[in-house]
Image (tube, helix red, strand yellow):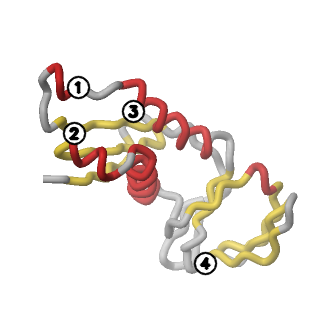
């Protein structure tokens, strides 16, 4: 549910997000290689946390959590009340559920999952792109140079 600055929002609906990782290695020789397996493992872990979940932007000014139990989350967003099963929700510390915010948050989770120190040793820059439909999305980049 993307929220707009005037307090309106999209209806609750789903997306099949696509995530793309691009990075530039400091050393592209044999000894500078990194395992695609490790990269895919981190991407998959983050993706699985969001898969088949209602993504909620907890930093949105129109989001108000009313009650959270072990089983349910009750909240309002743009003056509409929602009660959802907690195991079907992923609370994200972002301002909005939009590809721009999702790309930035995904990038920060990826860097944390890989280890920023380790990543800086082998990568000059990294980009995560999140598409909500083919060709419609946003990227977030981090330059270590």
CA distance for labels 1 and 2: 8 Å
Looking at the rendered image, the disc whose residue lies closer to the viewer, 1 or 3, is 1
Q: Is residue 78 above or below residue 10?
A: below
Q: Earlier in the sequence, mark 1 or mark 4?
A: 1
Secondary element at tag 1? loop
**Residue 91, image x, y percentages:** 64, 61
Give the label on residue 122, or none.
Answer: 2
Q: CA distance from mark 2 to mark 3?
A: 13 Å
Q: Position of residue 107 (x, y in %)?
A: 38, 51
For label 1, the residue is 33
At label 3, counting other C-alpha atoms closer than 10 Å, the crowd grade (few under 14, some 14-19, many 20 or more) is some
| Residue at 65 percent of width and 55 percent of height | 90
> Marks 4 and 2: which is nearer the front?
2
CB atoms at circles 1 and 2 under 8 Å apart?
A: no
**Percent from the top left, x then y, of residue 64?**
69, 78
Tell which circle, 3 or 4, labels the residue nearer the N-terminal end.
3
Q: Nearer the viewer, mark 2 or mark 3?
A: 2
The residue pinned by badge 4 equals 62
Instruction: Look at the numbered discs 4 and 2 and tell me whether their residues touch, using CB distance below 8 Å.
Output: no
- Asked which quadrant contains residue 12, the reply is bottom right
Residue at 64 percent across and 75 percent down: it is 63
Which residue is more in the foreground, 124 or 116?
A: 116
Name the residue tied to disc 3.
39
Please, what secondary structure does the residue beneath circle 2 have? helix
Label 2 or label 3, whichever comes before in sequence order:
3
Residue at mark 1 to residue at mark 3: CA–CA distance: 12 Å
- Work out whether mark 4 precedes mark 2 in sequence or the reverse, and give the earlier one: 4
């Amino acid at each position: 549910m993307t929220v707009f600055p005037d307090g309106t929002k999209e209806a609750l609906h789903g997306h099949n997000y696509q995530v793309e990782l691009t990075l530039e290695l400091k050393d592209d020789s044999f000894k500078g290689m990194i395992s695609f397996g490790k990269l895919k493992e981190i991407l998959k872990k983050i993706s699985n946390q969001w898969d088949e979940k209602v993504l909620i932007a907890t930093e949105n000014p129109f989001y108000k959590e009313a009650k959270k139990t072990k089983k349910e989350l009750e909240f309002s967003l743009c003056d509409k009340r929602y009660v959802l099963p907690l195991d079907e929700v992923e609370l994200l510390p972002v301002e909005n559920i939009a590809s721009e915010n999702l790309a930035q948050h995904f990038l920060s989770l990826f860097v944390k999952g890989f280890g920023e120190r380790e990543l800086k040793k082998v990568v000059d820059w990294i980009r995560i792109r999140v598409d909500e439909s083919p060709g419609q999305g946003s990227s977030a980049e981090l330059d270590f140079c």
